Image (tube, rainbow, N blue to C red):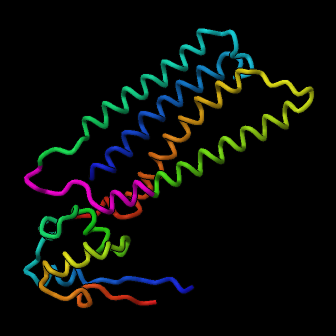
Amino acid sequence: MAKAEIRNQVRRLRFEQGEMTQQALADRAGCTRQTIVSLEQGKYVPSLALAFRIARVFGRTIEEVFEYGE
Amino acid sequence: MTQGMKRALGGLIIWGLVLLGFAVTVFAGGGPAELAGERGRILAGAVFLGLGYLAFWAMLWITRERESGGRVTRDERDLEIGQRATATALAVVMGFVFLCCIILYEAHREPAVLPIGWMWFLAYASVLVGQLALALSSLAQHLGMGDHGQG
């Protein structure tokens, strides 16, 4: 089975939101700053619930923030 | 540094020191085979393990979750790391106990007599190996997931 990869646009979206800090995003999404760091580095795939909360912070749909590819 | 990483680092230091004291206690005086009847060494090993647990619990209390203005200090990623580290530690302990038993079996098959001190060694060593594997695995995963990243 091919390895699935979840890419995300979190870093770009933070930048577009007036350089929102990782801590500010973490506070609003209800996770730790280290989780945002890991997400942006592609080293952690969030749960569906966290993915929805992050998308909601940016006012985007989940597909606009996270992308699934094989 | 997250709470999970602090605890992994603390655990590694504490159990590393306990292992050092344990190894000196066991191997400096003739090895596990000659432990039976040596109350001093047996007591020293128990004291090392007891002090290790006291220090470990103190470290857990010091690094407990505190009020941080509603800020999240532990989340799903920490839980996932904890689950992976526990699974790794379990595998390491199983492998350690299995290998020890097989080696002891082969070494003492003839004349089928095993010095009872080895049982004491296996009991204590498996606890220490488990705690060290848990701390090491947890720390490695925290570092691997970018805990050192910049804000």
Q: Position of residue B78 (x, y in %)?
A: 33, 57
User: Which quarter of the rendered picture does the C terminus of chain B lie within?
Assistant: bottom left
Q: Is residue B53 left or right of residue B41?
A: left
Q: Is residue A45 left or right of residue B20?
A: left
Q: Is residue A41 left or right of residue B43?
A: left
Question: Does A55 sit above or below residue B80?
Answer: below
Q: Is residue B76 magenta?
A: yes
Q: Quadrant of residue A40?
A: bottom left
Q: Position of residue B107 (x, y in %)?
A: 84, 33
Q: Residue at x 55, y 20 (%)?
A: B45
Q: Residue at x 59, y 27 (%)?
A: B23
Q: Residue at x 47, y 48 (%)?
A: B136
Q: Position of residue A21 (x, y in %)?
A: 13, 70
Residue furthest to the front in view is A49
Q: Position of residue A42 (x, y in %)?
A: 36, 75
Q: Is residue B151 magenta?
A: no
Q: Residue at x 48, y 18 (%)?
A: B47
Q: Which residues are magenta?
A: B68-83
Question: Does B77 sit above or below residue B100?
Answer: below
Label total for image = 0
Q: Nearer the viewer, residue A50 or A11?
A: A50
Q: Nearer the viewer, residue A14 or A46?
A: A46
